[in-house]
Image: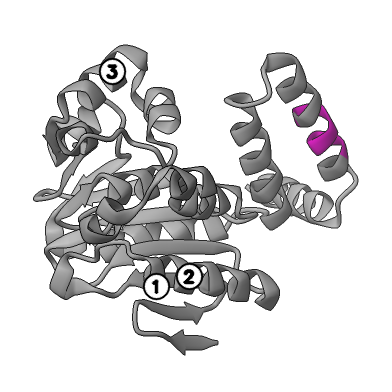
Amino acid sequence: MSGEARAILVETEDRLAVVTLNRPDVRNAIDSTMVNELHDALDGLLADGEVQAMVLTGAGDKAFAGGADIAQLRERGSLDALRAINAALFNKVEALPFPTIAAIRGYALGGGCELAMACDLRVAGEGAKLGQPEVSLGILPGAGGTQRLPRLVGLGRAKELVLTGRILDAAEAHRIGLVNQVVPDAEVLPAARRLAREILKQGALAVRLAKLALNASSRAGQDAGLLLEQLAQAVLFDSTDKRERMTAFLDRKARK
């Protein structure tokens, strides 16, 4: 399966989708066209049913996504904010039933950083720059940034980054837990693909339910999260994949 659109490129191979934000001339700024096309691309991956992992990246070497389109943001009013245009998309990314990895080269600022945080994992190039500079424009990170950033780096650091608008380099982003890996810039996409392939070796249903339980841990509270974990484990205990994988493990152990 493959598809192409002006603002979004999609390639899939052997259960892995690579989705590319394709506006390199404007540092892959997230405008309404990109939002709509990314919705369509994600809907297509879900309808396909074969994809079990996704890498999200930006075209070119200057940016993952430099942020939302400022010209469009300037013209939006309170009703537009209540429509949660970008937030609805990023929530959709976070809720995808398969793991997602942001492959970050160059800038991931504002809405670009929020989109990266909506992914499950983040691989950054050594030259990457990440941050939430919205307060410098008279707004706040309103597409999930005030919620996801504290979960990743802690409330104190999140307040510092949001209230100052400070931009981080890749090394500091890794040190505080904003990104999972830092690699040479040229290795960002290959490293993200390798990480995705490592996940794809695991039990597909187990990975899907583990992601669901992990996401619930930060939203539903511990009691509800533990209940979901228990129910997910009950489903997995009766799965064919669990029995086959454990039988194979025991057979390998017996042969040693």
Q: Is residue 49 magenta?
A: no
Mark 2 residue type? Asn
Residues in magenta?
Answer: 229-234
Q: Nearer the viewer, residue 129 or 226?
A: 129
Q: Which quarter shows the N terminus?
A: bottom right
Q: Tell me residue 194's x, y (percent).
A: 38, 61
Residue denoted by label 2? 36
Which residue type carries mark 1?
Thr
Look at the picture and state if 218 lies above or below 7.
above
Task: Give the structural element (helix, strand or loop) at label 3.
Answer: helix
Q: Residue furthest top?
A: 156
| Drawn side of residue 182 relative to residue 237, left or right | left
Q: How would you rate the neighbour count of disc 1 (Cα within 10 Å): few for under 14, some for 14-19, many for 20 or more?
A: few
Most foreground residue, 193 or 41: 41
User: Closer to the N terminus: mark 1 or mark 3?
Assistant: 1
Predominant secondary structure, magenta span: helix
- The structure residue drawn at horizontal position 62% and vertical position 42%, both measured from the top left corner, is 211
Residue at numbered disc 3: 159
Left or right: where 47 falls relative to 40: right
Q: Which residue is mark 1?
A: 33
Any part of residue 51 in sight: yes
Front one among 107 and 217: 107
Residue at image position (60%, 56%) is: 98
- Measure the C-alpha gap from mark 2 to mark 1: 5 Å
The answer to whether mark 2 and mark 1 are in CB contact below 8 A is yes
Q: Residues within 10 Å of mark 3 (few under 14, many from 20)?
A: some
Which residue type carries mark 3? Lys
Nearer mark to the viewer, of 2 and 3: 2
| Residue furthest right in the image | 238
